[in-house]
Image (cartoon, rainbow, N blue to C red):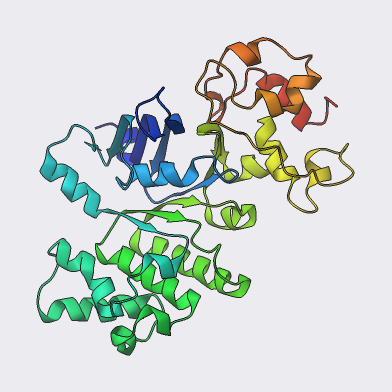
Amino acid sequence: MNQSSRETLVEARDVVVDFGGRRGSGSKRAVAEVSLTIRRGETLGLVGESGSGKSTLGRALIGLQPATSGEIVFDGVSMTTAPRGERRDARRRMQMVFQDPYASLNPRMQLEAIVSEPIVAHRLATGGEVRSRVRDLLRQVGLDPDWSKRFPRELSGGQQQRVAIARALASEPDFIVCDEPTSALDVSVQAQMLHLLKSMREQRTLTYLFVSHNLAVVRRMSHRIAVMYAGTLVEIGSRDEFFASPLHPYTRRLLAAVPGNHQQIDPELTHAPGPLPAPGETPDTNSCPFWSRCPLYEQLGAPERCRTEKPELGAIDAGHAVACHFVEAAALQTQGEVR
């Protein structure tokens, strides 16, 4: 195994996820040939508007949503072709924290039963050791261990999310998909939850896929950021590159929509742009998925290539890749040389 393989924990190779039957007979493509890697110990932020396929990709990576095609590799184990026992052991090491904590917790179960489920299912402890582990996990996430006999309805939203995090940690995972884990919480509670997730990452050397539409939260949590549009990845790079040098026209539009940030991204904008028109059906044709909404397309005189050839996610420099046929023009625009 080479050095790059040792550094990579999760890899998606041309992953496709379709909903609603066979492709071509009423199905909808939610994820369209996405390839990415997530390194050990890092947080990869995944951003994009609602319906872009972010959550579906996250679920597919940990096996909650079957991929229609493509391959997912976890720590060198193919989740498609490896023996069943290897895949089962790998799945224990992958968990998810959902957006709505109350909906993700069984209201009829006490906290002890909720948190102990992964421990029992994966045979990580038996008898009194299970209860001891549950109490320790509740303590680690900032809850009173004596609350183990309470029900989710007796807790606040922030406390419920702490229980959800404790449950995710119970199976001793290496990789956690955080799907909008703070969006349902008050702002003050959001800060506490982000601090908890960062602390757990450092203490346990966890790897996160952090799905969110909140760019401020993503900036605080992520080492790298990937941008998803209509089921495809259009840009991926370091956190600093994402905020300082966005290249894809869609990435620029996302950042310009942040209050107070629009003139920094595009000095010609006197007001923050409104929301983009709905993208409609996720495209799977040989075209750029963003061409019909792309301001650069109009500025360059409506080049035919955008409508007839799908751009590849190509490297611009080390660690920064963009899916755009005219990335040089996009770079000049970022530098303020194209208006």
Q: Position of residue 130 (x, y in %)?
A: 17, 76
Q: Position of residue 318 (x, y in %)?
A: 53, 30
The residue that appears at 39% across and 33% down in the rendered structure is 18
The residue that appears at 39% across and 82% down in the rendered structure is 143
Query: In this view of the protein, which residue sits in the foreground, 108 or 298?
Result: 108
Q: Is residue 266 visible?
A: yes
Relative to 221, is 82 on the left or the right?
Answer: left
The vertical placement of 128 against 102, above or below, is below
Q: Position of residue 329 (x, y in %)?
A: 73, 21
The residue that appears at 31% across and 68% down in the rendered structure is 167
Look at the image and tell me in which quarter the N terminus lies: top left
Relative to 213, is 17 on the left or the right?
Answer: left
Q: Position of residue 106 (x, y in %)?
A: 32, 71
Outermost residue to the front? 26
Quarter occupied by residue 87: top left
Look at the image and tell me in which quarter the C terminus lies: top right
Q: Is residue 245 visible?
A: no
Relative to 5, is 335 on the left or the right?
Answer: right
The residue that appears at 73% across and 44% down in the rendered structure is 275
Q: How many marks?
A: 0
The vertical placement of 86 against 203, above or below, is above
